[in-house]
Structure formats: C-alpha cells, structure tokens
Image (cartoon, rainbow, N blue to C red):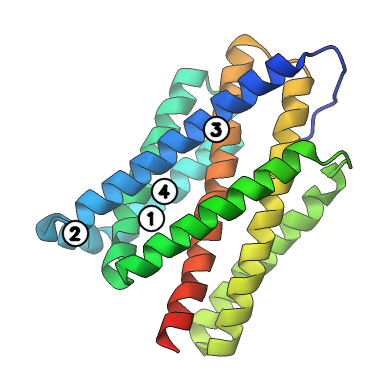
Amino acid sequence: MQTYPTTTAQSADVVRTFMARTYSWMAAGLALTAGIAWLTASNDALALQVLQLRFPLMLAQLALVFGLSMFSQRLNSAVAGTLFIAYAALTGLTFSAILLAFDRSAVTAAFATTAGTFGVMSVAGFVIKRDLSAMGRFFMFAVIGLFVALIVNMFVASSALTLVISIVGVLLFAGLTVYDTQMLKNMALSGVTGEMAERASINGALRLYLDFINMFLFILRLFSGSSRS
C-alpha cells in the first residue's frame, strides 16, 4: 500500500473535509449494496437469475475492484466514481444470496456489530499518533495467508479451521481499518487538492468499503456458527 509524506501546512478543516468526502462515498456504496441485496432477495425470479449468473457476476466484481485498485492514479474522478458505484451494485447482487442463506436476524446483528467495530477502529486510526505505515507489508501477507487458508478449508471443510479463520479475519480487517484510516489521514495532510483529492477520496472509500465488507462476512460466519451450536 502506498504511503504519503505528511506536512503541518494543512489545516484540520482540510483533513476533515477530505475524510468526510471519503466516508460519504463509502456510505453511499454500502447503502447501495444493502439496498440492491434486499430488493434482489425479495424478488424470487430476480434472485434465481442472480444465483444462476453468480459466477460471471463475481468475475465482473473482481475485474472492477482490481481495475480500480491498479489504475486509481490514472482514472479521472468521474470514471473512478462510476466504477466504484458499479462495484457496489454488483456486490449487492451477489450478496443477495446471503439474505437467502442466513437468518435475517443473524445478518442484522452481524451488520450492526460490524458497523460498531468499524466505527471504533476508524476513530482509533484517526487519533493514534504512532506511525503505522510499516505495517503495510504485514497486512498484505496476512491477507494472502488468509485467502490461502480459505481455499484450503474449502477442501478440508474443518469447523475448527472455519472458526479460527473467522476470528483471524475479523481481527485482520479491524486492523486494516485502523491502518487505512491513518493512511488516508496522512494523504490529506500531504496536501492533495482538487481533482487529485476527489480521486483519492474515491480510492480511499473503496479501501474502507472492502474493510467493512470483509469484516462483516467474517463476523457473520461467527454469528451463524454460534446460532447453529
């Protein structure tokens, strides 16, 4: 993950404006995802069609998120914003399966828990003075390791490993929320303005959105596992 030099020339108002813009994009993405997921799950015909097209939809999601991540510095803000909204909409379609597969009360509880945890971690990332930029490489390898563990568990189907993966996943993405929040704060302090600031806020919103979504998925695993036991 890219880090940015900080200066003391930027006012607190500039930082607050940038962070508010970033969280506004993220909130819009989450609201769109939740709304489309709920509408899709409420329409049996549409939900069935989405389930039949789930694999190509997931490939489209991956293409969008990798495109946004890799070319975020080259895209103008209008294109980046459109791609982010498209990604959030596609995620809503695929996440409709969650509302069909899990108890609605578990989904609601998991979402509320994620929102609270994310909020606390974001505040922590904003107020912590210690420089966390050196943690970037650790988080990158930790995400790769978690992904490998998920693939392995698809074949061994171990309930104990599922529990461990879920706990580690929650802790990892909670930590990433702290890290990403501080990196975004440092970016604002570096003096980004205008088009660059808008593009950076969209890219930052994507990072926080992914932190939230992944944390939610692992918390939902924990909640659904405990409800079956």
Nearer to us of marks 3 and 4 is 3
In this orientation, which residue lies closer to the viewer: 171 or 67? 171
In this orientation, which residue lies closer to the viewer: 221 or 138? 221
- x and y percentages locating residue 22 in the rendered image: 57, 29
Residue shown at 77% from the left, 13% from the top: 11
- Find disc 1 in the rendering and name its residue: 58
Neighbour class for label 1 at 10 Å: few (<14), some, many (≥20)? some
Residue 27 visible: yes
State if disc 4 and disc 1 touch (CB < 8 Å): yes
Q: Inspect the image, locate mark 4, and give the three-letter code of the amino acid beneath it.
A: Gln
How far apart in space, not on screen, are marks 1 and 4 (Cα)? 5 Å
Position of residue 160 relative to residue 110, above or below, is: below
Of the two numbered discs 3 and 4 on the same chain, state the one appearing first in sequence.
Answer: 3
In which quadrant of the rendered view does residue 44 lie? bottom left
Determine whether, in the image, residue 181 is placed left or right of residue 203. right
- Find disc 4 in the rendering and name its residue: 61
Residue shown at 38% from the left, 49% from the top: 91
Please, what secondary structure does the residue beneath circle 3 have?
helix
Position of residue 210 relative to residue 111, above or below, is: above
- Find disc 2 in the rendering and name its residue: 47
Residue 74 visible: no
Which mark identifies residue 23?
3
State if disc 2 and disc 4 touch (CB < 8 Å): no
Of the two numbered discs 3 and 1 on the same chain, state the one appearing first in sequence.
Answer: 3
Position of residue 165 relative to residue 30, above or below, is: below
